Amino acid sequence: ARCAGGFHFVITCGTVGGITVLKKRASALPDPVQSAITCLQAPVDLPWAVGAFLRRWNADAFIAMEAEFWPNMLYQCSQRGATLVLVDGRISTKSAARWSHWIVRPLLLNLLARFTLLLCQSEIDAKRFQTLGMKDARCIGSIKAAALPMPVDAETLGRIR
């Protein structure tokens, strides 16, 4: 199913808990948006698994969250002409130092060059990405911090407390 704009969104997550949250959030959306969203487990970042996933879903765009640098997924999406965007981008001081190493830096530069847009959680994260070679990285703030809280079942919360 596609929403009014003709789009279908496939949202993936690497954990079962994440998929549960995604499905719960998606089910609260109005139709036709709700029927245009599919929530799935992300494929393992192996060439054959990513290839099968992309053949099935034929993505026009790939939006990664936070620090999701899966080389096979990014490479294959890029090779198929999909637009790559990183949203809520973040990179720790420790990770930035590791990615700066002369052995792995060319891999990172190759991955970052595939992104059309890199939106970071903080000015510090944007600066780290810029230092690593993504000159157009910019800060828009944290999407997670701006999101509405998940609905809570008061009875269950009372039992937990």
Image (cartoon, helix red, strand yellow):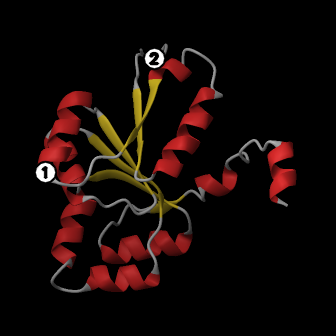
* Most foreground residue, 82 or 46: 46
- Helix, strand or loop at disc 1? helix
Q: Is residue 133 left or right of residue 157?
A: left
Q: Position of residue 130 (x, y in %)?
A: 38, 72
Q: Which residue matches tag 1? A: 47
- Helix, strand or loop at disc 2? loop
Residue 119 is marked as none
First in residue order: circle 1 vs circle 2: 2
Q: Is residue 92 left or right of residue 116?
A: right
Residue 5 is marked as 2
Other residues around mark 2 within 10 Å, as few (<14) / some (14–19) / many (≥20): few
What quarter of the picture does the C terminus occupy?
bottom right
Please give the name of the residue rendered at 15% of the width and 41% of the height, measured from the top-left corner: 51
Please give the name of the residue rendered at 35% of the width and 86% of the height, measured from the top-left corner: 97
Q: Amino acid at mark 2?
A: Gly
Q: Position of residue 109 (x, y in %)?
A: 22, 68
Q: Position of residue 64 (x, y in %)?
A: 39, 51
Distance between the alpha carbons at the discs numbered 1 and 2: 31 Å
Total number of numbered labels? 2
Please give the name of the residue rendered at 59% of the width and 15% of the height, measured from the top-left corner: 31
Tell me which corner region of the image, top left, top right, bottom left or bottom right, holds residue 106: bottom left
The answer to whether residue 90 is visible is yes
